[in-house]
Image (spheres, helix red, strand yellow):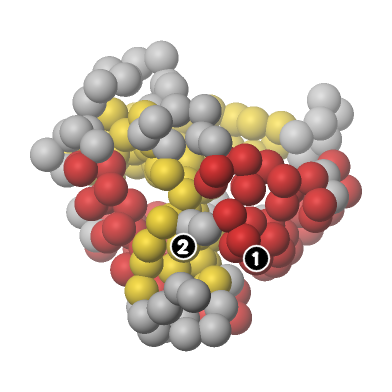
């Protein structure tokens, strides 16, 4: 039996993959523009997402890829995936990436985001990275303000991604912070 400490962050367990996938789908619906959220939700089903998260937890493709969960006494309220940055202008051995980060909309403004952010930075630092990067939607003022208050800043990189060839596109900006 696993003892869970209330309001904590730790490595994800394989049996939490479904909770992570469900939380990610709720987060998409709450934070993305409606057309983008609908495209994403219709492009992948819950079972496939669950299988993907379970594989990332049990057999990560890289030794430094970690899935973290923020938990309360009875449920997962947030998750993050961190690892080496794969951006062409970064140093693989020095630049870590927060690749995924979601807090359950039902648990916003309860300190889980701050705990999870600190755990992401601590995990990347423990893996030897000296800088952390994070791609954020250009129009996500709430997340950008949260990160800026925590010491992150835009580094000038930007991109645009789409989830279908003729579908909605999302503009992203990269934030970074020194963690060494």
Cβ atoms under marks 1 and 2 closer than 8 Å: yes
Residue 137: mark: none
User: Which image quarter is the C terminus in?
Assistant: top left
Report whether residue 36 is seen. no
Element carrying mark 1: helix
The residues tagged by marks 1 and 2 sit, at their Cα atoms, a distance apart of 10 Å
In x, y percent, where is residue 97?
38, 37
In x, y percent, where is residue 143?
44, 59
In x, y percent, where is residue 55?
62, 40
Q: What residue appears at the point 20 percent right and 43 percent down from the top-left corner?
A: 126
Q: Is residue 9 above or below residue 93?
A: below
Residue 19: mark: 1
Q: What residue appears at the point 35 percent right and 16 percent down from the top-left corner?
A: 89
Report whether residue 22 is seen. yes
Residue 69: mark: 2
Q: What residue appears at the point 60 percent right and 30 percent down from the top-left corner?
A: 160
Q: Is residue 1 above or below residue 52?
A: below
Q: Residue furthest left?
A: 180
Q: Is residue 107 left or right of residue 31?
A: left
Q: Is residue 99 left or right of residue 111?
A: right
Q: What residue appears at the point 43 percent right and 22 percent down from the top-left corner?
A: 86
46 or 161, which lies in front?
46
Q: Is residue 39 left or right of residue 6?
A: right
Q: Is residue 65 above or below residue 8?
A: above
Mark 2: give few (<14), some (14-19) or many (20+) Cα within 10 Å.
many
In x, y percent, where is residue 65?
43, 37
């Amino acid at each position: 039996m696993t003892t869970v400490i209330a309001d904590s962050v730790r490595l994800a367990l394989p049996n939490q993959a479904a909770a992570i996938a469900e939380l990610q789908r709720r987060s998409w619906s709450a934070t993305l523009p409606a057309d983008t959220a609908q495209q994403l939700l219709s492009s992948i089903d819950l079972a496939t997402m669950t299988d993907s998260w379970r594989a990332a937890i049990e057999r990560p493709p890289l030794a430094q890829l970690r899935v973290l969960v923020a938990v309360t006494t009875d449920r997962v309220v947030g998750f993050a995936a961190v690892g080496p940055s794969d951006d062409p202008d970064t140093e693989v051995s020095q630049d870590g990436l927060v690749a995924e980060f979601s807090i359950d909309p039902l648990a916003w403004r309860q300190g889980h985001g701050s705990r999870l952010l600190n755990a992401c930075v601590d995990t990347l630092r423990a893996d030897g990275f000296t800088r952390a990067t994070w791609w954020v939607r250009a129009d996500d003022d709430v997340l950008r303000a949260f990160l800026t208050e925590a010491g992150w800043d835009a580094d000038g990189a930007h991109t645009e991604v789409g989830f279908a060839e003729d579908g909605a596109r999302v503009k992203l900006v990269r934030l970074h912070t020194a963690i060494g």
